[in-house]
Amino acid sequence: MLTMLLILYIPTPLLRRYTDSRCVMDFSFPWIQTTAFLNYIVYSWVVFEYFVPVLVMLISHAWVIHIIKKSQSSRHSDSSQNVESSLQIKRTVIHLVITTAIMSCQQAILHSFECISQILIICEVVVYTYGTSIEQMGTILILFGCSSNPCILIFSTSTLRRYLLSLIKGKRQKMSSIETYGQTEYNQH
């Protein structure tokens, strides 16, 4: 994480300048070659901000699935009467695979717009203009992807879904009891 912070985030703010109430990149430093720096920023951003997280997500979920299957096979060799628990573990693995696939595809698809537009800009196929709809669309898609990950986890994991429903039910009961208490106090006066 520290390496990603140093590679991705530290260079860019050092080059920010405010001119006429607008934030602009200032490449007037003699030790910076503009095109090389932009290429570095865009391609390192693509690798470390998009591909690495997807790979980490896939590898960590694959490792969890491997551990679950390994524990299932050792338990299965101990007693063959655990057909029910074996089916439950198989369902859990299937749900985990589906969740992993959805989250990985969602991140790759929603972030790809920003990646492609940045690469097209540095290859001078598209001219970058501040505040355009292309710039805003990339940000909107990334924000949508980040905010949809918790929803994907909640709706695809029955334990989290039950916990959320019980939490909402508890809050609703608490609110209705407060409302009932407030009405009885009002009626007594």
Image: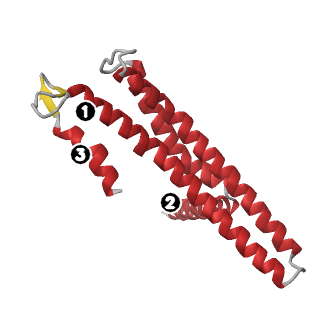
Out of 131 and 189, give the one closest to the viewer.
Answer: 131
Q: Is residue 107 left or right of residue 94?
A: left
Give the CA distance from mark 3 to mark 2: 59 Å
Q: Residues within 10 Å of mark 1 (few under 14, many from 20)?
A: few
Residue toward you, 120 or 19:
120
**What kind of residue is marked 3?**
Ile
Q: Residue 168 in the image: x percent, y percent?
A: 60, 59
What residue is disc 3 on? 10
Is 129 left or right of 119, judged from the image as shown?
left
Q: Residue at x 36, y 56 (%)?
A: 1
**Position in image of residue 147 (x %, y %):** 50, 44
Quadrant assignment, res 87:
bottom right
Closer to the chain start, of discs 3 and 1, is 3
In-front residue for pair 188/125: 125
| SS state under label 2 | helix
How far separated are the C-alphas under marks 3 and 1?
Answer: 13 Å
Between the C-alphas of marks 1 and 2, the distance is 68 Å
Disc 1 target residue: 37
Residue at x 60% of width, y 41% of height: 105
The amino acid on which the numbered mark 2 sits, given as a three-letter code, is: Tyr
Q: Which residue is mark 2?
A: 186
Q: Residue 180: where, in percent of width, then height?
A: 58, 62
